Image (tube, coloured by chain):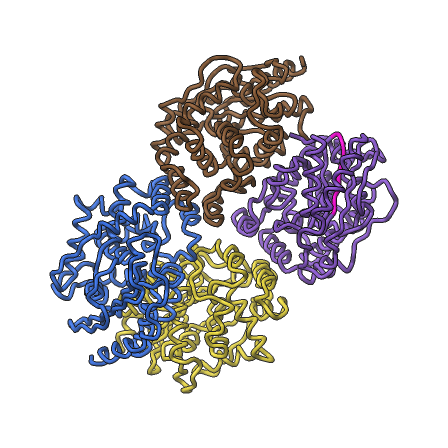
Chain colours: A blue, B yellow, C brown, D purple
């Protein structure tokens, strides 16, 4: 296990040459404030060891990574019936999102494109009286520490003010009867879930159940069945990185999920979860330095699902 | 390892209830002759053990599975430069193939859609004096036995007579200068490579290098680097099943490749390769019974990359 | 001129055999109430003669025909600058609306598809303090009689309750900064303009300026220049019938505009304007009997722009 | 009628300021040889008067204008049954050609996009023993003079050598069984028909029947019925200028057809046919100076179908 300590050390050294690369997301003012030179990484093993470098305890906006949490909540309740409303196939290229929604009658390709995540959030309103609280409680339950998880109201408001594209998507799906609750309410929660602030350490901890057949190692509580966990990992593998899922799978070889805040989380089944954060994005919207750090991790360790 | 013998036995029992399901490919007369009730399966481990049920030694048309062989040949020569001419991302839905080619200036999304495979075959003409012979020699070198691999001239001719869609694709890419050799020659070889007849046993053997870091276990010969092997597996995982790659990944959880002849091959890295054959296809063009058999294999064994 | 009296008589006879054909629009309850057997037609010549058959004075929901009025208002103010925000090309097929908006950065193909009409309505808010009143005043000014034009609040509300597709379109264009005013306000006016109730006689009268170089014959008031009138007619010719513009041009040969309420208005430049109404629609959303009546009109009279 | 002499004189003066604008088609070497400064124009009235300016008797490659001739030949034989194999709707934007063919099962949108014209040429083989000769004879029969119409073998060969996109289209339609004859033969004739050399005077003469209810004024021979002529004009109006049909209709207001050789022909029903030629194209592939000359013609004369 010292292996990981050494590898992370090596990554920390290598990262210096490329730190600050990429372009911070600037479509909303709150995200644009991030420092492109920031970098943190944390790897947590199933047996509870934690290895970290950089700003591993600095909180940042998890954005689309939140889609994994809401999916896990909804999947555990609905099981396979969920796939009547959202698919499990990659979406191809970004321009397809709307035409595919149209050609496929308002059923999104997968739960990680925005349209699919909006359907998942819509379902939360059918399952919980207070879905916002339920989501925070769920994420909190995944963590080792007691530091409370919170939405960031400034980020949520900022997202909402610029959220016309998501408003278009949700109205379009409502037209096809694939959204059941009022669009305003669903959009509000969606922008709030994306605004959650978490650190690399927290994210890595929170993804451990996906490396451990669906069980929270800290509490022994089961959040998904073994089969559901396998399927969620398969979904992350094929759809977790927008239209760069193939490239991530190709270069890193681990299931994972990224967010425009610059965070990425990935899991090595039966071994560990790892999170990295650096706000500079490549042109596909994934953390440029983060992708590289994970590529090095699998290269140096020789660990990969393939 | 007796485990596999038992599991295959159980699959053979279970398969009786669904044998004959699906629709045999009938777009060319030669494939339409297949018996939908046929079924074979063979699992070969890295240490040389072979487990088989049904018609595991019956030869059938491997069709698109041949794309993995040509890709391996070309990738080992060109390395990462190959990705200038063909991408590594899933293609989304089938209707996208042509519009994506158009929007992306004739560069196919990945080497497993027909357009991408045609580019790969085109490159064979730049690498070999006699690419047809080179391909047969390559596949033969992967096998344990000496039973000679051959093209099936009836199937190749039948494909060619109905090959207007592939002719459209290759002319379209030639328009974008992504095909260098005469379209007729490339198409001819493409139809021949798809016509190769192999058995489940041969296919499983031939995929062992992808489970073993790129080395042919029978000869110790390396065909790909460890890193290239990982990448080829990642490509099969995300793009190996047409627009059903997500579903296969979701249900089976192994990298693999299917063909409209009803064959499927998959690998469990560091453990085994497995091939299944049953000509009845689902509406996405993948073997219906074969998909189920592999799903049972991973369910019963608990083995999956996730 | 008795010619027209005879021709309309002949059409009235012929129409009996097909009356009631087509399917009444039922996407909102208010429109679904229409009687598919209804039929009216009115032809008004430049020199003031009126020829009518059937329920020519029965009011109905003009729906998309209102797009011609708002376009005329905005075009007369902005002139050619209008085409920076909306195009003048046919849109091809319906499924293209969203992908085209996406590929062309939120600029709709023409002012008669919903997206384009929403941009036009958005501009009304920049031109008038009370655009709803301005629109009613404008339409009233085109008419001979004094019967007041009104919005139908039940229809407008009904449209709004089901208006998720239009909400998607307008949010999408707002994302691309091609909508300047609050989406709710623009949508409200859009649904109100579509809800206007007018009779065939009123519609035919109101379109006379487009047959007369832009001058209202009853008052001598100019609403468009000769050149602008020609261009508006060209737009109706190429884009006035959703994805059936070609077929209407092909069969009828006059510039015109249809609405899902079952109304159609067309003009023969320098000669007349004609309106027809019958609520049963064909599968493209145009009045089935109305299309036929206009086809007969041009066949029997030998009149066509071609 | 002196009116036209004066107007053409005025256009000749005005044209000096923009002569040479646009970009000569260079996708094949033979077309690239054209002099962008060339300009010719000829207007022929129904009563046989001819007005011309510039190089009105200089022959040039008519390219897509030939699609009107083949359409007229086929339409007169098949009548409305033709529309089972090719549509009458505008195609929207160029990128749609292939996806629309795919979504609409190989039926092209209209006979003036390349796919549609290929279907029309395919039909010629069902109608004539020697369709190439039949085409030349047909065009010759439309003309007043006896100067023989010929294919240009250099242009035809040059087109063929670069004709991969058309080869893609025709193979794609053959896949959908919408091409009956061998693709090579159909392509050959298609490239030959596009290579016809004609002058502005000849083109204007040849289009007079479309301004005269389908009758060749020089011989009194009928080539189309009145109704077919109206429909062919409607098709030119809505589909004659690639994805700029709306703009041409909008600015010029006459049915017409353009070619990448820089030629345009338009008709004013019951009055005249007019042809203009200048090889510099705009980015949509239509003659830049030619479009302007026709716009001036309708502006100065006040003549338009609208």
Residue C274 seen in the figure: no
Q: Nearer the viewer, residue B152 or A198?
A: A198
Residue A251 as seen in the image, left or right of residue A43: right
Q: Quadrant of the C terminus of chain B?
A: bottom left
Q: Nearer the viewer, residue C158 or B29?
A: C158
* Residue in the picture at 85% in, 35% down: D219
* Residue in the picture at 56% in, 60% down: B169
Q: Quadrant of the N terminus of chain B?
A: bottom left
* Residue in the picture at 45% in, 25% down: C135
Residue A12 as seen in the image, left or right of residue B216: left
Residue C124 as seen in the image, left or right of residue A13: right
Residue D267 position in % (x across, y down): 72, 36
Residue C215 position in % (x across, y down): 59, 22
Magenta stretch: residue A193 in it?
no
Residue A261 seen in the figure: yes
Magenta stretch: residue D273 in it?
yes
**Magenta region:** D270-277
Q: Is residue A107 above or below residue D305?
A: below
Q: Nearer the viewer, residue C213 or B32?
A: C213
Residue D19 position in % (x across, y down): 72, 49
Q: Name the main secondary structure of what is drawn in magenta.
A: strand
Residue A102 position in % (x across, y down): 42, 45
Where residue D192 sits, quadrant-wise, is bottom right
Where residue C210 sits, quadrant-wise, is top right
Count the marks.
0
Q: Is residue D94 above or below residue B247?
A: above
């Amino acid at each position: 296990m010292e292996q990981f300590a050494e590898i992370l050390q090596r990554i920390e050294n290598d990262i210096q040459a490329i730190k600050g690369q990429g372009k911070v997301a600037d479509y909303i003012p709150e995200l644009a404030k991030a420092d492109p030179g920031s970098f943190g990484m944390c790897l947590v093993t199933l047996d509870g060891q934690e290895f970290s470098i950089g700003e591993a305890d600095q909180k940042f906006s998890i954005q689309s990574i939140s889609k994994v949490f809401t999916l896990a909540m909804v999947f555990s309740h609905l099981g396979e019936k969920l796939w009547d409303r959202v698919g499990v196939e990659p979406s191809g290229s970004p321009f397809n999102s709307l035409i595919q929604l149209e050609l496929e009658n308002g059923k999104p390709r997968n739960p990680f494109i925005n349209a699919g995540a909006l359907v998942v959030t819509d379902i939360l309103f059918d399952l919980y009286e207070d879905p916002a609280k339920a989501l925070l409680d769920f994420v909190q339950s995944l963590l080792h520490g007691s530091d409370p998880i919170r939405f960031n109201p400034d980020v949520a408001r900022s997202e909402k003010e610029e959220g016309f594209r998501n408003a278009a998507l949700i109205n379009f799906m409502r037209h096809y009867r694939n959204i059941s609750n009022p669009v305003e309410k669903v959009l509000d929660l969606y922008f709030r879930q994306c605004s959650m602030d978490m650190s690399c350490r927290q994210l890595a901890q929170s993804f451990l159940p996906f490396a451990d057949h669906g069980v929270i190692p800290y509490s022994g509580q089961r959040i998904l069945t073994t089969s559901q966990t396998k399927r969620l990992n398969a979904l992350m593998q094929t759809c977790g990185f927008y239209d760069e899922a193939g490239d991530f799978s190709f270069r890193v070889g681990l299931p994972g999920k990224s967010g425009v805040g610059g965070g990425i989380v990935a899991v090595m089944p039966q071994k560990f979860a790892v999170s990295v954060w650096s706000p500079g994005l490549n042109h596909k919207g994934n953390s440029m330095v983060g992708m590289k750090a994970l590529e090095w991790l699998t290269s140096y360790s020789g660990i990969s699902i393939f």
